[in-house]
Amino acid sequence: MSAASQSLIDELRERIRRLERCPARREGFLPSGRPEVDALLSGGGFPRGALAHLVGGPASGKTLLSLSTLATAAAEGGLAAFVDGRSELYPPAAEAVGLDLRRLLVVRPRRTSPAARGARGAGRGEEALAGLWAAEALLGSGAFAAVAVDVPLRGLVSARAEAMLRRLAAAAEKGGAVGLWLGASAPGCRVPAAVRLDLPGVAAGVADGRMPSPLMAPAEREGPLPEGEGRLFPVGVRKGSAGGGRV
């Protein structure tokens, strides 16, 4: 195929995308901003248009790694988002690792009261679904270069959880975003990720300070969300700043 023919085809594809209101596809890889991690990844970063599963317990460095990746996306001129289903992310800590808060959206889904959750944790399932639906919208929008998702799957049966995770993978492919899944998978649930990183293995430097992980807000500084409310921090707006919204 000649260069002129290929150029014409590419132009037609772009016009079709605009007509269908589909985002232009991003391709390639997004560096994590951590050379020791990028050296382990094919292409030197996380693949665009796919999910990556970051596996690790408390203080493993997965939140740090996700924020570092979001910082890289923002530094390239893109927008980044963090779906904070645990209500624990402390935005100034993200800023401390180089993430431009003007290019970051933090979404916190609604929370239900313990009484509303019931003995079987039905409310937990609703909370998980709210976070997953938000993540799907962000990943598929085409507006965000990278989206980190930290949503506990408590209250969801494994089949429902896996179906929702497949939707996230499809949304990332549609929007061309790098999706970073930080949550643990439900028992019997497979995360459809193109890349899986076991952080206790790749982030062994946490213990000696090379990858510090004090990124979660102390309870006394962040505090729990009021029952029945969620918080949305628009790009560049910190908690407590004027202009903060609610969802």
Image (cartoon, grey):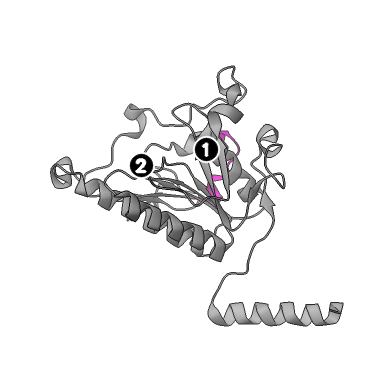
Q: Which residues are magenta?
A: 95-104
Which sits earlier in the primary sequence, circle 2 or circle 1? 1
Q: CA distance from mark 2 to mark 1?
A: 31 Å
Q: Nearer the viewer, residue 13 or 105?
A: 13
Label 2 crowd bin: few (<14), some (14–19), many (20+), radius 10 Å: few
Residue 27 occupies quadrant:
bottom right
Identity of the residue drawn at 42% across and 38% down = 89
- Can residue 230 be seen in this snapshot? no
Which residue lies most toward the front here? Answer: 188
Identity of the residue drawn at 67% across and 79% down = 13
Q: Amino acid at mark 1?
A: Ala
In the displayed structure, does residue 81 sit left or right of residue 160? right
Q: Nearer the viewer, residue 147 or 121?
A: 121
> Vertical placement of 114 versus 171: above or below?
above
Q: Secondary structure at mark 1?
A: helix
Q: Secondary structure at mark 2?
A: loop
Identity of the residue drawn at 41% across and 40% down = 184
